[in-house]
Image (spheres, rainbow, N blue to C red):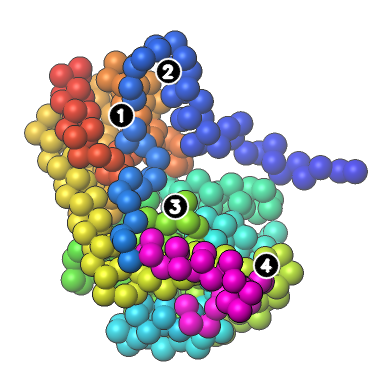
Amino acid sequence: MNKNNNYQNLQENYLFKEIGDRAAAYLASHPGQKILRMGVGDVTRPLPEAIVQAMQQAAGELGHADTFKGYCLEEGYEWLRQAVIDHDYKPRNIDLDIDEVFISEGAGSDLGNLSELFATDNQVAIMDPTYPAYTDANIMAGRPISYLPCHPQNGFVPELPKKKADLIYLCFPNNPTGTVLTKAQLKLWVDYARENHSIIIFDAAYEAYITQPDIPHTIYEIEGAKEVAIEVHSYSKSAGFTSVRCGYTIVPKATGLQAMWLRRQCTKYNGTSYVAQRAALATYTPEGRAGIRANLDFYLGTAQLIKQRLHEAGYEAYGGENAPYIWCRAPHGWDSWTFFDHLLQECQILCTPGAGFGPSGDGFVRISAFSKREDCITALERIKNKL
């Protein structure tokens, strides 16, 4: 038996496990202390009542013979896939066929599993800094990776690859920097992919946080994108489904990959739970939408508060307008982990070190707005007073 030796090329610990381990070590040596958690992108506000009721009703149906549900279609129930088309795409004049929509247990799984569609010799281009799962999935597969640096000098907007890229990962609104692209900027990537016969995997998990009217909510607002782009969405960040687990991925037939993805799902996936899909359907009701909007506005308000207070304290901070994250430069020329440890040890604050998102992230930390408002205010006072 031979192991997949590509795993040896991964960082020793996954970023968020390392953060958890350091937090646990701090609490073990400081019993009774409370850590203000502003690192992991886990939502903190409860689900809207309309969504809870939908799950309760769905769970009740499973307790009766005449309404019991077993395995569903691997690509999801048609009523949810049609709702995705009707509510998320038709209002933006985007036509999709129902068999181009695939319901999943969440964006994280699909972002990793999509790499199975591509040969291992494809050249991969990944934004830097970026969500580490993109990089890890391709390292595990043994693909060559080139990084697209994003920093203040280029507005955290990556330049087109100098070396031909076969597979491109883009995330907008961006995690971790909070950057967005205009239609003109996104069109450059679609045009590049069409000219070079590349595929873009577009992570739109934070689309619901967009506040600017001229920012595209989907890559398919760009002409020709259905030929070259797969789009991944999550109900976790928009509707608070981090524990419910549901999302969807669009694989247009024009990419030549729709049949492959369907075959992959039929072989390796038994479908998203009925209860989770009914919960997702409830996000499109007037009551569900109103509850979700209230939560999104709360998180965005917290993000703007964090950014404002950091600026007042003399910090260089980005993001917060179209995403629930603040990208903050470490003071004193510190690297990311030094700043992370200082915030943990001296302020009892847990953030995310930017170096964990890629080489260009070093010297920054990500601060999450998925926190209680009072905890954020306390954390910001500590940051101001301790540095």
Which residue is drawn at the image coordinates 45% and 63% (left, top)?
56
Stretch in magenta:
51-80
Report the residue at 48% width, 82% height from top.
Answer: 79
Q: Earlier in the sequence, mark 2 or mark 1?
A: 2
Residue at the disc numbered 2: 27
Q: Amino acid at mark 2?
A: Leu
Q: Quadrant of residue 123?
A: bottom right
The residue to which callout 3 is attached is 242
Magenta stretch: includes residue 38: no
Q: Position of residue 159 (x, y in %)?
A: 38, 58
Secondary-structure class at tag 1? strand
Expressed as whole percent of the image width and height from the top left, the position of residue 107 reads 50, 60
Give the residue type at disc 1.
Leu
Quadrant for the N terminus, please: top right
Q: Which residue is mark 1?
A: 36
The answer to whether 224 is drawn above or below residue 309 in the figure is below
